Amino acid sequence: MSKRSALLTSREQGAFVGSELPIVDRALSRILAEGLARGPVFCEWGSGLGGACGVAALHGFTPLGIEIQRELVDSARVLAESLSLPLVFAEGTFLLPGDEDLVGTATDQTELTFDSRAWDEMDLTPADCDVVFSYPWPGEEDMMDRIFARHASAKALLVTFHDFGRVLVQRKLHHQKDLRILGWM
């Protein structure tokens, strides 16, 4: 992974920050050990080089990644193939038409588009995902929570990476828009 990220152009590097994979691994191990995931479908929103998807695959999840930058999608696909991991990546956004009202806290780091192209390519909807992983830019945590709450199915998990090596795990409650914090892992 580090070799591949070293090959990114300066423009790509400026818009890409990878998660700390040992911490993602620890969180997914605990999610599995505690039986928190309702199923195997793992989707990484803003997948970059697909590191979290790779870790999810090693834990037996069915990993899917959505990334808006074509160069990162291409690199993630090459990396997955070289590692013989069953990872699927789609170019596009996890934001759907109608989500415009949810992005009030977006920062300049986020490229915002609203379409279903990536979901259509994977023949999925956000409601099909059992575990959603994201590494939000600082200040965008609430936006991710609102997007997940709108589209996820009941009992799905939102796993977000935060600074200082922390991962927050939340569950969607029924068909309400509330999330229940399960804990920091």
Image (tube, rainbow, N blue to C red):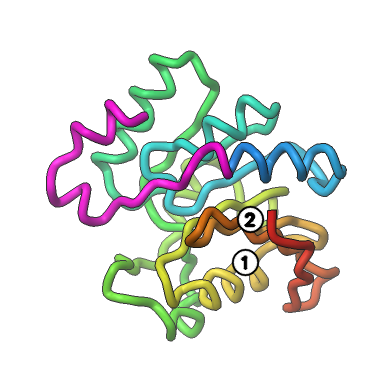
Looking at the rendered structure, the secondary structure element under dot 1 is helix
Q: CA distance from mark 1 to mark 2?
A: 10 Å
Q: In the image, is residue 91 above or below residue 40?
A: below
Residue appearing at x 21%, y 55% in the figure: 14
Residue 182, picture quadrant: bottom right
Residue appearing at x 42%, y 71% in the figure: 138
Q: Earlier in the sequence, mark 1 or mark 2?
A: 1
Quadrant for the N terminus, please: top left
What residue range appears in magenta? 1-23
Looking at the rendered structure, the secondary structure element under dot 2 is strand
Of 151 and 54, which appears nearest the observer? 54
According to the image, label 2 marks what residue? 159
Amino acid type of the residue that numbered disc 2 sits on in the rendered structure: Val
According to the image, label 1 marks what residue? 148
Mark 2 burial class by Cα count in 10 Å: few <14, some 14-19, many 20+: many
Amino acid type of the residue that numbered disc 1 sits on in the rendered structure: Phe
Residue at the front extreme of this rendering:
164
Residue appearing at x 51%, y 28% in the figure: 87
Q: Position of residue 44 (x, y in %)?
A: 53, 47
Q: In the image, is residue 43 above or below residue 112?
A: above
Residue at the left extreme of this rendering:
10
Q: Is residue 82 left or right of residue 98?
A: left
Of 123 and 183, which appears nearest the observer? 183
Residue appearing at x 50%, y 76% in the figure: 98
